[in-house]
């Protein structure tokens, strides 16, 4: 998946215009800056992802990387024509997640964004809370993604709210589903419900799905889950 918002900092107006257009066609909200000073002076500059050129007027690209990393845990991709054996190690040391050398195809930039964003989103999932909104029938992921829920999803997720990170037995989950005496086929019923719920989450967000099976016990929601 791609981030919802992205800042593109590059002083090549033609390149940045066409790259922004390519990403916007994929559903990304792109804000362009011709230099680092403009980004740093923008009080509304808070993005899910940053693409940074190194050869910028004003604040140098490596300096900008250092500032961004101090301010944000968002993904940072460097796309630059600066050459030199030390460039790659320098930009990673300054805080970039990945480096691509110009010239580069827009599809390559897109794939790099996806790879970096997937990793950064998974890291955020480890600390951010998930929220169960029963009235809206949605599960809200830490990255803001909203997952629409079926009745069965709501019934099992309510059990995980009360469990506070501890495993919930198959028996308790089946009882919540109204199948307390499901017999041998109960495992298949529960597994099907959990499979569909996992797929809904996976389609909505690149974050790790915290819903995991516990052998001979049941299932556990390995993240903070609160009800709103």
Image (tube, helix red, strand yellow):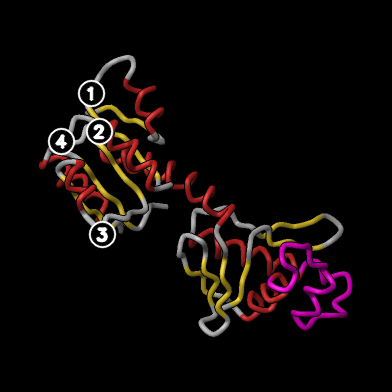
Per the image, the residue denoted by label 4 is 58
User: Image point 35% across, 58% down: which residue?
Assistant: 4
Judged left or right of residue 113, residue 138 is: right
Q: Is residue 95 magenta?
A: no
Q: CA distance from mark 3 to mark 4?
A: 20 Å
Query: Quick check: 1 above or below 36?
Result: below
Mark 1 — residue? Answer: 82
Looking at the image, is mark 1 or mark 3 earlier in the sequence?
Answer: 3
For this rendering, which residue is in front, 167 or 201? 167
Structural distance between the alpha carbons of marks 1 and 4: 16 Å
Residue in the foreground of this view, choosing between 59 and 111:
59
Label pair 2/1, CB-CB below 8 angstroms: yes
Which dot, 1 or 3, sits closer to the camera? 3
- Residue interval drawn in magenta: 161-188
Which labelled disc corresponds to residue 44?
3
Q: CA distance from mark 1 to mark 3?
A: 29 Å
- Kindly identify which residue carries mark 2: 61
10 Å neighbourhood of mark 3: few (<14), some, or many (≥20)?
Answer: few
Q: Position of residue 107 (x, y in %)?
A: 30, 41
Whether residues under marks 1 and 3 lie with C-beta atoms below 8 angstroms apart, the answer is no
């Amino acid at each position: 998946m791609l981030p919802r918002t992205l800042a593109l900092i590059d002083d090549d107006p033609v390149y940045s215009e066409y790259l922004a257009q390519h990403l916007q066609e994929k559903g990304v909200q792109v804000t362009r800056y011709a230099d680092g000073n403009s980004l740093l002076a923008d009080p509304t500059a808070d993005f899910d992802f940053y693409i940074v050129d190194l050869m910028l007027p004003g604040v140098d690209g490596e300096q900008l990387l250092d500032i961004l990393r101090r301010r944000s845990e968002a993904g940072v991709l460097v796309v630059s024509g600066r050459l030199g054996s030390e460039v790659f190690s320098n930009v990673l040391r300054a805080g970039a997640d990945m480096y691509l050398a110009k010239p580069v195809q827009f599809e390559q930039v897109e794939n790099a964004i996806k790879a970096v964003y997937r990793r950064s989103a998974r890291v955020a999932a480890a600390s951010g809370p998930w929220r169960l909104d029963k009235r809206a029938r949605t599960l809200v992921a830490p990255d803001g993604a909203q997952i629409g829920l079926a009745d069965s999803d709501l019934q099992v997720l309510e059990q995980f709210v009360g469990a506070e990170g501890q495993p919930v037995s198959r028996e308790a989950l089946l009882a919540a589903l109204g199948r307390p005496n499901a017999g041998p086929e109960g495992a298949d019923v529960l597994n099907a419900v959990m499979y569909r719920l996992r797929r809904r989450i996976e389609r909505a967000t690149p974050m790790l799905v915290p819903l995991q099976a516990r052998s001979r016990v049941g299932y556990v929601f390995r993240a903070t889950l609160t009800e709103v």
